[in-house]
Amino acid sequence: MTPINDLYTQLQVAGWGWLIAIFLWLAGIAGMGSVAYYWVRRTSLAITLLVAIILALIFVVSDLTRPWNVPHAMLTALFTGTYNWFSWMAIGIMLLVIQLILLLIIVYKHLIGHRIKWLKWISDIASSNIYLLITAFFGFLVTIYSGFLISQASGIPLWNTPLIPILWIISASICAVALVEIISVLSGDLHDEKLLNTTKIGFSIDVFELFVVLSFIYVMLTVGTIGAAIGAEIIYRGELAALTWIGVIGLGIIYPLIIGLYTITTKRHDKALIISAALLALIGALILRYVILAAGVYEPLSISGFS
Amino acid sequence: MTRYAHLWDAGKCIGCGACIIECISANHSDLMEGDNKSWEWVPSNIRRIEIEGLTPKILLLQCQHCENPPCVHACPTGASYIDKSNGLVKIDPSKCIGCRYCVTSCPYNARWVHPVTGLPEKCMGETCLFIVEKLGGKPVCVSVCPAEARDFGDIDDPNSSISKRLRSSRYIRLLENKGTGPKFFVVMEP
């Protein structure tokens, strides 16, 4: 790598590290998990999604350097009309709160149901297909948002690509499938054929994710700016290479692919293997987010500032 | 309309660092013995970039007070904003939640995080703003420069010193291709 004397990582300057990676990961789980919930309407899945979105909010707030100022800043911004409705951060705050409320109502339906008679309309609404479609739609938007939040940060050229939101959707879809697999295996109440179908879906998305991850690295390395190329180089052969190749590709994609292929071809359901593959897919998705965050560097002005 | 801009003359700059030190002294005296961990640099709003094999040999970098600032577009609460009366990009600490989206959105890496307050700091600091807006003076980096390598003023006023210098100079603006409309003019060596 060419020595550049004004190379700054965003990790050093802005400090978006593991906390933000976990936030993005949880937002993706809650987001695409809400889409999966449309087909797999289980109590355990609904509770998991609600916990995921609550934790996502906790993680993102805990990453703020001025968290005590949030209530005052938000109220002031709203009342003085300066709240920036076009900022992806602001859009995300709204989407996360909406998704939290939507999931809260679904969990209410599962846990309370019709037991409180004057509130039984809530459970009725939460059981309707329209409501679940809206929840799935907002889940999709939350996932998309978590990608655009990164790709629109124009200081970090590695992130300024539409491949990031696409990658986030694919990776979050894998998380949703993994979650369904884990819940299905642990609850033991899914027919083998359904589990096989879930595995097939997971396998197809895994193949697609492998293609998109490698494409992302290749594209940023070859046609990105100098800053983007440096970031891609950090990912594929720099200090984050071990996390990329072992964590993201090896454990997060290849291992689940092998287990998926084994399950599909033999039609045998080794539950331990399926759970291990699902867990590693989830962990791989988290590492993917961290790697992309941590590899982000600013455009070196000593080289490209004068273009 | 007033449009304030900075000028830095690479040919005149002797690299003494007075502007950097004066910025700390005026705007960040609370951190005189502290660090700017974001840049691993002194707690100044100006950072110095060494350039090998190109002209100029050093580049002094700070907020470009862009006309289309990504940091302002990114800020969820409006804490980062353009002062429409003079075109300066400012921060309102009362509205800042410390998300640092402005920091990751600045293509110039012109913001750094205050280690105590968590505010994304940048040029111009409070003291410089006071001098410029209340006293009608120039920022401390300009007034302290022994080589007159720096200037500041209204580029919409044809009689301002910065406008006159720009008319007679060959200058560039950094990362113009990003569409940010920077108002930090780098006068190149003849």
Image (cartoon, coloured by chain):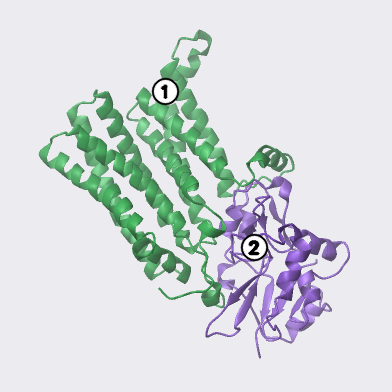
Chain colours: A green, B purple
Q: Quadrant of residue B122?
A: bottom right
- Picture layout, residue A12 above or below residue B139: above
Classify mark 2: helix, strand or loop.
loop
Which three-letter amino acid code belongs to the residue tagged 2? Asn
Classify mark 1: helix, strand or loop.
loop
Measuring 24% from the left and 50% from the top, which residue is drawn there? A254
Left or right: B39, with B147 as reference point: left
**Residue B51 at x, y percent in the picture:** 56, 80
Q: Quadrant of residue B157?
A: bottom right
Left or right: B54, with B162 as reference point: left
Measuring 72% from the left and 49% from the top, which residue is drawn there? B93
* Cα–Cα span, label 2 and label 1: 46 Å
- Chain of residue at mark 2: B
Front-most of residues B59 and A225: B59
**Residue A177 at x, y percent in the picture:** 31, 38
Numbered mark located on residue A128 in the image: 1
Q: Quadrant of residue A223?
A: bottom left
Residue A287 appears in the figure:
yes
Q: Which residue appears farthest toward the right when viewing the image?
A: B135
Pointer 2 residue: B68
Density class for disc 1 (Cα within 10 Å; few <14, some 14-19, many ≥20) is few
**Residue A132 at x, y percent in the picture:** 42, 29
Density class for disc 2 (Cα within 10 Å; few <14, some 14-19, many ≥20) is some
Residue B155 appears in the figure:
no
